[in-house]
Image (cartoon, rainbow, N blue to C red):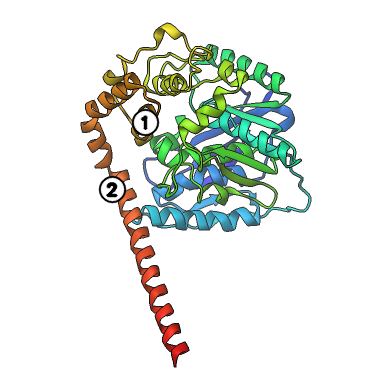
Amino acid sequence: MRIETIHAGPALLAGHHRVAVMVHYDRPGHQPETLWFDMPEALAEPSGTGNGWLVALLPLAFHLGEPLRLEASVDPVLLANAHRLQELWTRWVPERRPVPIEIAGLADVAARDSGGTALMFSGGVDSFFSLLDFDRTARAGGSPPIADLIHIWGFDLPLTSRREYQRISARFNNLARRLDRQLISMATNLRETRLGSISWAEVIHGPALGAAALLLRRPPAVVLISASGARLDSMPYGTHPLADPLMSTSRTSFRHYGIETSRIAKTAVLAESAVALEFLHVCWRSESDRNCGRCLKCCLTQMALDLLGKRMQATVFRPERYSLRLVPTLRVQTHDGLNYMKELRGEAMARGRDDVFSAAAEFLAANQRDARRLASSKWHRTVRKWRNSIAKRRAAAARLVRVLRGWGGSNHAG
């Protein structure tokens, strides 16, 4: 796979500049295609640098088994991390092997500067929690809060939804002004290229976010990527506490933020913020700027707010659309949805909310078949193998520790 820097014409949005590459595939029958990102003109990365393109396209090269050849220089720390990232992916998916990475040379890191802290921001529960919690912790420690919110059109909202994007962009600009932050609006066709054929949630999500941040002319010093759930023994996923830091360069550090906090605990933080309750956006089913109030993500969020006593204060939802009778009729698509409903069922029991508990329990019973289907998917078979491998290694390490302790004790006695 050869990556050629090109000029790709005008950007979709006024005041933006397009940076683009042509992707040439080694595999017969795969025609070349253009991958582009649009970003504010003042922030667009000059041509000839390859950090962002390496992060964006490495998952596809790994998936196809093609060497990745970049006609651009790359940060030396990122290059080393890219090899480590492939080793991690190979542990998760043993049938895939690391691919060679060829670059034009190593980038001059001494001449480059970085900005402050940026948050990849979708407006959902996870990213709002990261914004509020990081700022609280930073101010308590006398550190600067988050400076930039990076929002990308083309990830959750398709490029065909221009009118909806303009409305949600206006809302997020209003939010940024209220909080005295800079909103960096970007757009990309990444999900319309061959990258879109790979699972977004399980593979591409993290690298797509990382690529956008690294394509900025002055990349942030710290980039926060919000954890999508609390996993103490986190399974392989598109964003991951082991994988996200491996997108770091000499000047930019990536952090997987919030993995230690459950979704209900995150929602509790949001529930105390009037701004979050006014601007929260969790719904992409309608491909619009509004929360439909009826899909699974909307219902999960409203159930949590209901348990917290804050549902009526959340003006982003129309209260008349909330119905616990709807919940058992919904169908789950991901393990995150199942796990969150289980969390809500436990919280409802603890709070004595029989109505919410019953709705959650009926949903889980109705979705048993889908839960088994998800558990038997190829990806989750890989996850189970990975977890079993981790368990075996831990057991072996524990046995070795016991042997060494016994050996040390017998030597001491002698």
Name the residue at 60% across, 42% down.
52
Query: Nearest the camera: 79 or 203?
Result: 203
Q: Amino acid at mark 1?
A: Gly
Label 1 environment density (alpha carbons within 10 Å; few <14, some 14–19, many ≥20) = some
Residue 403, x across and y down, in percent: 38, 78
| Residue located farthest toward the left when viewing the structure as drawn | 369
Q: Is residue 202 above or below residue 382?
A: above
The picture quadrant where one finds residue 49 is: top right
The residue to which callout 2 is attached is 381
| Quadrant position of the C terminus in the picture | bottom left
SS under mark 1:
helix
Q: Is residue 392 above or below residue 348?
A: below
Q: Can I make out residue 189 in this image?
A: no
Residue 112, x across and y down, in percent: 76, 47
Q: Amino acid at mark 2?
A: Arg
Report how far apart the C-alphas of labels 2 and 1 lie in the structure. Answer: 18 Å
Query: Nearest the camera: 321 or 86?
Result: 321
Residue 337, disc: 1
How many numbered discs sit on the rendered protein? 2
Of marks 2 and 1, the one in the foreground: 1
Name the residue at 54% across, 13% down.
313
